[in-house]
Image (cartoon, grey):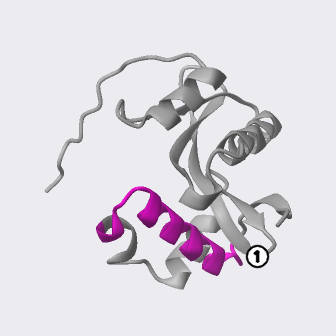
Protein backbone atom coordinates (compact mmCIF):
# COMPACT_ATOMS: atom_id res chain seq x y z
CA UNK A 1 0.00 0.00 0.00
CA UNK A 2 1.31 3.42 -0.94
CA UNK A 3 1.91 5.91 1.83
CA UNK A 4 0.06 9.21 1.94
CA UNK A 5 2.91 10.92 3.78
CA UNK A 6 2.77 14.45 5.15
CA UNK A 7 4.71 16.36 7.80
CA UNK A 8 3.08 18.78 10.20
CA UNK A 9 4.16 20.97 13.08
CA UNK A 10 1.92 20.37 16.05
CA UNK A 11 -0.10 23.27 17.40
CA UNK A 12 -1.69 23.72 20.83
CA UNK A 13 -4.82 21.88 19.66
CA UNK A 14 -2.86 18.74 18.71
CA UNK A 15 -2.62 17.19 22.17
CA UNK A 16 -3.75 13.73 21.07
CA UNK A 17 -1.16 13.67 18.28
CA UNK A 18 1.54 14.58 20.81
CA UNK A 19 0.36 11.77 23.08
CA UNK A 20 0.51 9.33 20.14
CA UNK A 21 4.01 10.55 19.25
CA UNK A 22 5.00 9.94 22.86
CA UNK A 23 3.85 6.32 22.40
CA UNK A 24 6.10 6.04 19.33
CA UNK A 25 9.01 7.36 21.42
CA UNK A 26 8.24 4.92 24.26
CA UNK A 27 8.32 2.00 21.84
CA UNK A 28 11.32 3.16 19.81
CA UNK A 29 13.43 3.96 22.87
CA UNK A 30 12.13 0.92 24.79
CA UNK A 31 11.33 3.26 27.68
CA UNK A 32 7.68 3.14 28.67
CA UNK A 33 8.57 4.19 32.21
CA UNK A 34 9.79 7.63 31.12
CA UNK A 35 7.29 8.23 28.34
CA UNK A 36 4.05 6.70 29.57
CA UNK A 37 4.02 6.23 33.35
CA UNK A 38 3.35 9.82 34.48
CA UNK A 39 1.95 11.75 31.55
CA UNK A 40 1.21 15.45 31.96
CA UNK A 41 -2.25 16.98 31.79
CA UNK A 42 -3.84 18.32 28.63
CA UNK A 43 -3.40 21.86 29.98
CA UNK A 44 0.33 21.30 30.45
CA UNK A 45 0.71 19.96 26.90
CA UNK A 46 -1.44 22.75 25.44
CA UNK A 47 0.80 25.34 27.13
CA UNK A 48 3.95 23.56 25.95
CA UNK A 49 2.72 23.34 22.37
CA UNK A 50 1.93 27.09 22.47
CA UNK A 51 5.53 28.05 23.20
CA UNK A 52 7.52 29.48 20.29
CA UNK A 53 10.68 27.71 21.46
CA UNK A 54 9.09 24.23 21.46
CA UNK A 55 8.88 22.47 18.09
CA UNK A 56 7.14 19.15 17.50
CA UNK A 57 6.97 17.66 14.02
CA UNK A 58 5.19 14.47 13.06
CA UNK A 59 5.21 12.33 9.94
CA UNK A 60 1.69 11.16 9.18
CA UNK A 61 0.27 8.54 6.84
CA UNK A 62 -3.31 9.70 6.71
CA UNK A 63 -3.89 10.07 10.49
CA UNK A 64 -1.36 7.46 11.65
CA UNK A 65 1.87 8.76 13.20
CA UNK A 66 4.88 7.14 11.58
CA UNK A 67 7.45 9.16 13.52
CA UNK A 68 8.35 12.56 14.75
CA UNK A 69 10.70 14.82 16.58
CA UNK A 70 10.71 17.21 19.48
CA UNK A 71 13.12 20.15 19.42
CA UNK A 72 13.87 23.25 21.44
CA UNK A 73 14.96 26.67 20.21
CA UNK A 74 17.82 28.01 22.31
CA UNK A 75 18.41 31.74 22.14
CA UNK A 76 22.10 32.56 22.40
CA UNK A 77 23.66 35.29 24.50
CA UNK A 78 26.96 35.81 22.68
CA UNK A 79 25.26 36.83 19.43
CA UNK A 80 21.71 37.71 18.42
CA UNK A 81 20.94 34.27 17.05
CA UNK A 82 19.53 30.94 18.07
CA UNK A 83 20.17 27.25 17.59
CA UNK A 84 17.83 24.27 17.68
CA UNK A 85 18.38 21.15 19.74
CA UNK A 86 16.65 17.95 18.63
CA UNK A 87 15.69 16.40 21.95
CA UNK A 88 13.94 13.28 20.62
CA UNK A 89 13.55 11.83 17.14
CA UNK A 90 12.10 8.41 16.32
CA UNK A 91 10.33 6.53 13.57
CA UNK A 92 8.08 3.56 14.29
CA UNK A 93 9.93 0.35 13.49
CA UNK A 94 7.74 -0.72 10.57
CA UNK A 95 8.35 2.63 8.83
CA UNK A 96 12.11 2.82 9.20
CA UNK A 97 14.58 2.94 6.28
CA UNK A 98 12.18 5.06 4.18
CA UNK A 99 13.81 8.47 4.65
CA UNK A 100 11.27 9.67 7.22
CA UNK A 101 13.82 10.72 9.85
CA UNK A 102 15.84 12.60 7.22
CA UNK A 103 12.68 14.31 5.97
CA UNK A 104 11.73 15.34 9.51
CA UNK A 105 15.12 16.98 9.88
CA UNK A 106 14.70 18.69 6.49
CA UNK A 107 11.34 20.06 7.69
CA UNK A 108 13.05 21.29 10.85
CA UNK A 109 15.73 22.98 8.74
CA UNK A 110 13.02 25.00 6.98
CA UNK A 111 11.63 26.12 10.35
CA UNK A 112 15.16 26.93 11.49
CA UNK A 113 15.67 29.19 8.48
CA UNK A 114 12.32 30.91 9.09
CA UNK A 115 13.21 31.78 12.68
CA UNK A 116 16.83 32.67 11.94
CA UNK A 117 18.52 29.76 13.72
CA UNK A 118 22.04 29.15 12.52
CA UNK A 119 22.45 25.47 13.42
CA UNK A 120 20.57 22.37 14.52
CA UNK A 121 22.28 19.94 16.86
CA UNK A 122 21.43 16.48 18.14
CA UNK A 123 22.98 13.81 20.34
CA UNK A 124 23.11 10.10 19.56
CA UNK A 125 24.24 7.12 21.57
CA UNK A 126 27.34 5.53 20.02
CA UNK A 127 25.58 2.15 19.94
CA UNK A 128 22.65 3.56 17.93
CA UNK A 129 24.38 3.07 14.58
CA UNK A 130 21.42 3.94 12.32
CA UNK A 131 21.03 7.30 14.07
CA UNK A 132 24.78 7.94 14.06
CA UNK A 133 24.97 7.18 10.32
CA UNK A 134 22.01 9.45 9.57
CA UNK A 135 23.44 12.37 11.52
CA UNK A 136 26.95 11.84 10.07
CA UNK A 137 25.42 12.07 6.58
CA UNK A 138 23.79 15.41 7.45
CA UNK A 139 26.29 17.21 9.64
CA UNK A 140 29.62 17.40 11.42
CA UNK A 141 30.28 14.96 14.23
CA UNK A 142 31.61 16.20 17.54
CA UNK A 143 32.29 13.93 20.49
CA UNK A 144 31.47 15.87 23.64
CA UNK A 145 30.87 14.35 27.03
CA UNK A 146 27.37 14.29 28.43
CA UNK A 147 26.77 14.65 32.17
CA UNK A 148 23.48 14.38 34.05
CA UNK A 149 23.69 16.47 37.20
CA UNK A 150 21.07 15.45 39.72
CA UNK A 151 19.02 18.16 41.41
CA UNK A 152 17.54 15.81 43.99
Decide whether residue 121 is among the magenta residues: no
Indicate the quadrant where residue 95 lies: bottom right
Indicate the quadrant where residue 107 lies: top right
The x and y percentages for residue 112 are: 73, 37
Which is more toward the observer, 79 or 117? 117
Helix, strand or loop at label 1? It is loop
Residue 38 visible in image: yes
Q: Which residue is painted at 64% across and 44% down in the image? A: 97
Q: Which residue is painted at 55% across and 42% down in the image? A: 86
The x and y percentages for residue 12 are: 68, 73
Magenta stretch: dominant secondary structure: helix
The answer to whether 18 appears left or right of 23 in the picture is right
Q: Which residue is painted at 54% across and 83% down in the image? A: 42
- In this figure, which residue is indicated by the disc labeled 1? 63
Image height check: is 54 above or below 116?
below
The answer to whether 8 appears left or right of 77 in the picture is right
Image height check: is 118 above or below 96?
above
Q: Quadrant of the C terminus?
A: bottom left
The answer to whether 108 appears left or right of 29 in the picture is right
Which is more toward the observer, 86 or 6? 6
Farthest residue to the bottom: give it: 42
Q: Which residue is painted at 82% across and 39% down in the image? A: 114
Indicate the quadrant where residue 37 lies: bottom left
Farthest residue to the front: give it: 1
Span colored in magenta: 12-33
Image height check: is 100 above or below 116?
below
Decide whether residue 27 is among the magenta residues: yes
The x and y percentages for residue 11 are: 72, 68
Q: Quadrant of the N terminus?
A: bottom right
Amino acid sequence: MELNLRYIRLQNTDIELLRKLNEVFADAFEDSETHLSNQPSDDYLRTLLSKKDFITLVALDREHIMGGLVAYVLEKYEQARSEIYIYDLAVAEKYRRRGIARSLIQELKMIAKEIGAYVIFVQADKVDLPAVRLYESMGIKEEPYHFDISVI
